[in-house]
Image (spheres, rainbow, N blue to C red):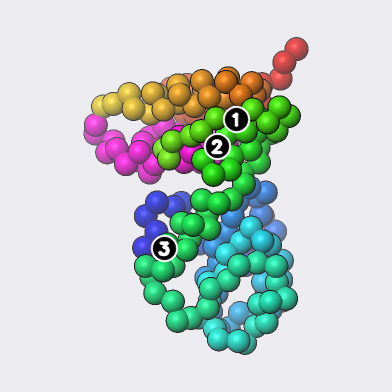
Amino acid sequence: MLPNYNIQYKNLIELKNKRKENVSIVFFINTKTKFGQINHLTENDLLITNTQDDINFSKLNLIYLKKPIYPKKIRSYIDKFLSNKKIDFEDIYILDKKLFNKHTNAHCSLTDIEDQIIIYLINNRFCSKEHIKQNILKIKSSIETNSLESHLTRIRKKLNKINTSLVIRSKNDNISIYLHQKK
């Protein structure tokens, strides 16, 4: 139902204890969920539930969808919800497919693919080229292409254009993003 997203299945307690700052979470909860299990959710989260009014969602400062809701509407709402999130990292932020320098407010636009790649790198800090090729670019591992390197080159140019200290490094089959410490 959600092929464009990195889906991980976690229980609510595990998420409460290991939450990353820049990650928006979509929660699917059922009728057995108690208010105390979800009261740590924030406005960065989307809650989808099959309950009626068993839980008073208005007490929570978050967006929620209640039944009846159809898969196509869920997918559409998740796409809209996640595309409008501000992603903060070091001296930049990303909002509405635009890359901003926090200090100078210099900015430039990102393509859909560039946006997906840089957000994935920010959320994971380190990954394999193969993972991005298969999961973001949708390129089979048997196909030889320089497409990923081309996208990374354009992203690096945009990082330089807005004068950020972020560096994307690719070596062998790995890619990482980090803040370059100037001497």
Q: How packed is label 2: few (under 14 Cα within 10 Å), some, or many (20 or more)? A: some
Return the residue at label 3: 75
Are the residues flagged by discs 3 and 1 in contact, CB closer than 8 Å?
no
Q: Position of residue 43 (x, y in %)?
A: 66, 61
> Is residue 108 one of those drawn in magenta?
no
Going from the N terminus, do you reach mark 3 or mark 2 first? 3
Return the residue at label 2: 98
Identify the element where label 3 is drawn.
helix
Residue 156 marker: none
Going from the N terminus, do you reach mark 3 or mark 1 first? 3
Position of the N terminus by quadrant:
bottom left
Q: CA distance from mark 3 to mark 1?
A: 29 Å
* Amino acid type, label 3: Arg
Of 79 and 166, the residue lying toward us = 79
* Residue 105 in view here: yes
Span of residues in magenta: 114-143
